[in-house]
Image (cartoon, rainbow, N blue to C red):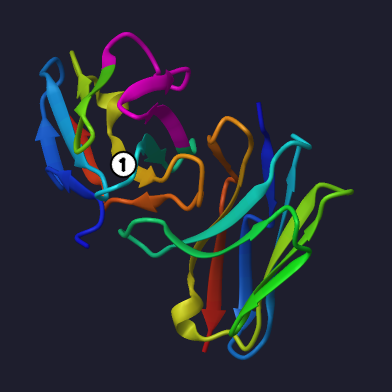
Amino acid sequence: DAGVIQSPRHEVTEMGQEVTLRCKPISGHNSLFWYRQTMMRGLELLIYFNNNVPIDDSGMPEDRFSAKMPNASFSTLKIQPSEPRDSAVYFCASSSLGGPYEQYFGPGTRLTVT
Amino acid sequence: GENVEQHPSTLSVQEGDSAVIKCTYSDSASNYFPWYKQELGKRPQLIIDIRSNVGEKKDQRIAVTLNKTAKHFSLHITETQPEDSAVYFCAAISNDYKLSFGAGTTVTVRA
């Protein structure tokens, strides 16, 4: 099993540009989570999906952030327009709905907005 | 929602000594408590977990204990080694399947 796959691994962009982060969950997992990690705020849950349906997006910081999961094997997190304060590491994680609850993290995307 | 507090924020131990990290949670409905280890520049990796119907679980040099009455759980690392140096996160999950993470503990093992 390849585990959770994220792309790109690193992204450097200028303020105002659109950024799209991608995630492929572990095959067979039906829950997908997007996290953001910074030194100041730690690990924050942004949004999660069960069976491709967004369940809780209360962690999405503002309307500039949006996430989609068009099918069971792909999800995107988009930031438009990006700002320097969005600089962080963004992790995607997946698990099996209904148990076991273990969440497996992808390698993360390090985003730098200049 | 769930609120998880973790202490200490940093921990320095001599190689071979034990390390203990403690967490408390607020939601009595929480029933799953994983611990993650994150090395510098890497992803968080699950190292051990415990469910609410168990009081203690051990895996080689690491062990977790859970006190549901007091709503706290702990990670114990014995015979620490340099490769145990990392940031450790506790977490709790409730009926909504959301993991709430503690703020993390930076463990440094001195050779």
Task: Look at the image and say whether residue B81 sits in the magenta stretch.
Answer: no
- Bounds of the magenta segment: A44-65
Q: Chain of mark 1?
A: A
* Residue A77 visible within the image: yes
Q: Which quarter of the figure has residue B13?
A: bottom right
Q: Secondary structure at mark 1?
A: strand
The one nearer the camera, A38 or A7, is A7
> Which amino acid does the dot numbered 1 rest on?
Cys
Residue B17 relative to residue A86: left or right: right
The image shows residue A101, relative to residue B2, as above or below, that is: below
User: Can residue A76 be spotted in the picture?
Assistant: no
Nearer-the-camera pick, A27 or B72 = A27
According to the picture, the residue beneath numbered tag 1 turns out to be A92
On the picture, is A47 further left or further right than B79?
left
**Residue B64 left/right relative to A18:** right
Disc 1 crowd, CA 10 A, few/some/many (<14, 14-19, 20+): many
Q: Is residue B60 left or right of residue B28?
A: left
Please give the name of the residue rendered at 52% of the width and 86% of the height, measured from the top-left corner: B81
Q: Position of residue B96 (x, y in %)?
A: 57, 30
Instruction: Specify whether residue A49 is painted magenta.
Output: yes
Say which residue appears at 14% left-offset and 15% top-offset. Answer: A16
Q: Position of residue A53 (x, y in %)?
A: 34, 21
Residue B18: % across, % down? 68, 81
User: How many numbered marks have been drawn onto this rendered protein structure?
Assistant: 1
Q: Position of residue B1 (x, y in %)?
A: 65, 26
Q: Residue furthest top?
A: A63
Along the viewing direction, whichever of B72 and A53 lies nearer the viewer: A53
Among the 4 quarters of the image, the one containing residue A113 = top left
* Residue depicted at 23% across the width and 34% down the height: A72
Q: At 67% from the left edge and 41% from the top edge, which residue is drawn?
A: B4
